[in-house]
Structures are given as C-alpha cells and as structure tokens.
Amino acid sequence: MGGVSHAFWDTLTALSCPGGKMLHNATMAKSIRISDDLYDMAATEAVLMHRSLAQQIEHWAAIGQAVEASGDLPKIRSVVVAHMRARDHERVRRGRASADQFSFIPKSMVRKAKVVFPKDAFAEYDR
C-alpha cells in the first residue's frame, strides 16, 4: 500500500458503503508458513481442480471448518486420519520418505513371518 495506513483504507471502505457502515471486512492477502507437504498437495490438487493455490487452501480450510463445526467426532477423526494418509502417500511419492517408515510391522518381522491357515479355512471353496 506504499505507506498508506490501514486506518486510511478502513475509512475509505467505510465511506464508500451505504450509511458509512462497513458491510464486510476488506480482506487483504496474508503470508503464512505451511509445510512443504501441504504446499505440494495443495499445488497438485489446485491444478486438478482448476483453482489457484490460494483458492485450494481456502477451499480445504472451509471444509475443515465445516467438519469441525458439525461436532461429529467420529467423522472428524476419520477425516484427520484420511488427511494423514494422503500426506504420507504424497511424501513417499515425492521421495521425501520411505514407505517402510509408515509400516506398522517392521519389514524384518514380515520377512520372518510364516502364514499358516487352518485346515478348514478354504473348505467352503472345495464344494
């Protein structure tokens, strides 16, 4: 704004509104720090959805607000877990993490494991 105070713009906005009252807050872009993972996910989704990066993040924020406002705790947990999985998948896809880092059972234990089925496990298929 080149040295012009926020008060000046607030006054100008108020004067330009009927009755001198602000009908809405004039919003200005703000810079925030977000993780590289969120940035990359939003950039990818923004291209697919034909939105700008800022529009995509605002869209996700609006959805998040709506979900939280619903008060449906199981739904909120489900959404959070889905987001965590998507973020982890994106990190693996971009080479920032290894898929092994997200395994519940260590690879060494999986390799040593022996799968044993009960004798009647496939009985219904033998008919």
Image (cartoon, rainbow, N blue to C red):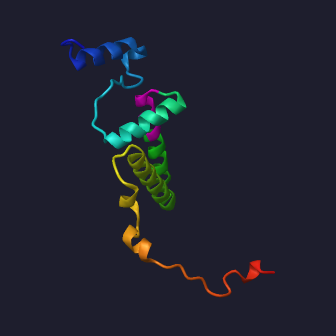
Instruction: Residue 70: give x, y in percent of width and height.
Output: 50, 52
The range drawn in magenta is 52-60
Q: Residue furthest right?
A: 127
Q: How many labels does the image show?
A: 0
Residue at the image position 36 percent from the left and 54 percent from the top: 98
For the N terminus, the image quarter is: top left
Residue at the image position 40 percent from the left and 52 percent from the top: 88
In the figure, 94 relative to 77: above or below? above
Identify the main secondary structure in magenta: helix
* Quarter of the view holding residue 30: top left
Q: Which residue lies furthest to the bottom in this view?
A: 119
Residue at the image position 33 percent from the left and 25 percent from the top: 29
Magenta includes 75?
no
* Quarter of the view holding residue 38: top left
Instruction: Residue 19: give x, y in percent of width and height.
Output: 40, 16
In the figure, 115 relative to 66: above or below? below
